[in-house]
Image: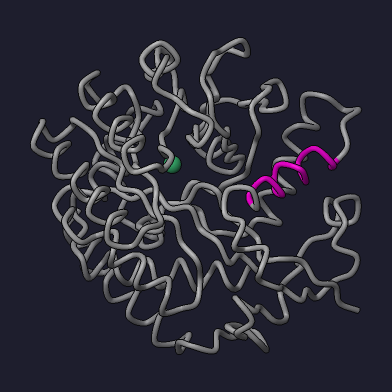
Amino acid sequence: MAATTPGLVCAHHHLYSALARGMPAPPKTPTTFREILEQIWWRLDTALDLDMIRWSAMLGALEALEAGTTGIIDHHESPEAIEGSLSVIADACAEVGVRVLPAYGITDRHGPDGARRGLEENERFIKERGRGLVGIHAAFTCTDETLQAAAGLAEDLGVGVHVHVAEGVDDADAPQRLEGLTRDDWLLIHCVHLPTDHTLRGTIVHNPRSNLNNAVGYADPARFSNPVALGTDGIGADMIEAFRLAYVMQRSVGVTCGPDTAWEWLATGWDLMPEARDDEVTWSYEPMDPWYLAFTAGVRPLEVRVAGEVVFSDGEPTRVDVAEVRAKAREQATRLHARL
Ligand SMILES: [Zn+2]
């Protein structure tokens, strides 16, 4: 038995984090979300160069296809390798056959020059390639001037903004900092600590596995009137798994809810990347129905077509050699881990 769906969309990914798995333990065990950023992610992103970015994106794109995901909305940061980084990611995804909508997450953590160079990378990429978002790391690591510059650039280019919002308590003032800047084409990531009666516009992207892993709390996205989509926050691109977790987390605070709501959140991905509707995934299981999938583990794609081309079949990608991608990614991971 098999059923087909369009290609799935991961509405928030960090392809650069594909090489993080197995990294050495940080010098000090993080005890808060802020310390997880400082001890893990901000040390890792600073150590990235363009070769590492290329192979992390190749590996992330490969693992997306292995999960039936053909569209990735990526949020990237590499403060020591900013210029050209979004093109490296886009080219790697194109090589594997996965669609990507990249953004460079600008921040003032590395001074105003770092923020300016990040903004320029967003502008360069979107002008050259035509399809992308303007990225902001989060309000709490940016000055008001930087937030305004990013919102202004996005408006000038006619694209949305991709920004983490109130993931942890450190960013609880994000609704005030971003007030008046957001528009309907913004992606507001996490929103765990965002008040229900906030005034921000845009799609809220819920990342259940990441929120559990970082112990930041439950976003309870059903409480918002904004559209809601699902992401992985860099832990792979298995969107059926993300749906299953989103459902069971919702269930953990309200035992009467069914899986239809989480399934609608998954489907919102097609509003964000409509081109993924042109893709077709043939699955190992039928029916691809939320009431079945919420309780069925191990569903996998048999074949993936992107814009009519078979890019995955018989458990393997057709355009790249899976063993080579994993070997090169492992080499780059070893280089990266040695720098930490
Ligand atoms: Zn994120």
Q: Is residue 223 above or below residue 22?
A: above
State the residue at coordinates (18%, 30%): 108
State the residue at coordinates (80%, 71%): 4
Horizontal side, residue 250 vs residue 32: left or right: right
State the residue at coordinates (18%, 32%): 109
Q: Is residue 261 magenta?
A: yes
Q: Quadrant of ligand 1?
A: top left
Q: Quadrant of residue 155?
A: top left
> 227 or 37, which is in the foreground?
227
Residue 303 image position (x, y, % from top left): 70, 81
Residue 247 image position (x, y, % from top left): 77, 40
Q: Which segment did they paint magenta?
A: 259-269
Residue 271 image position (x, y, % from top left): 64, 48
Q: Is residue 202 above or below residue 308?
A: above
Residue 141 image position (x, y, % from top left): 26, 26
* The N terminus sits in image quarter: bottom right
Q: Quadrant of residue 337?
A: bottom left
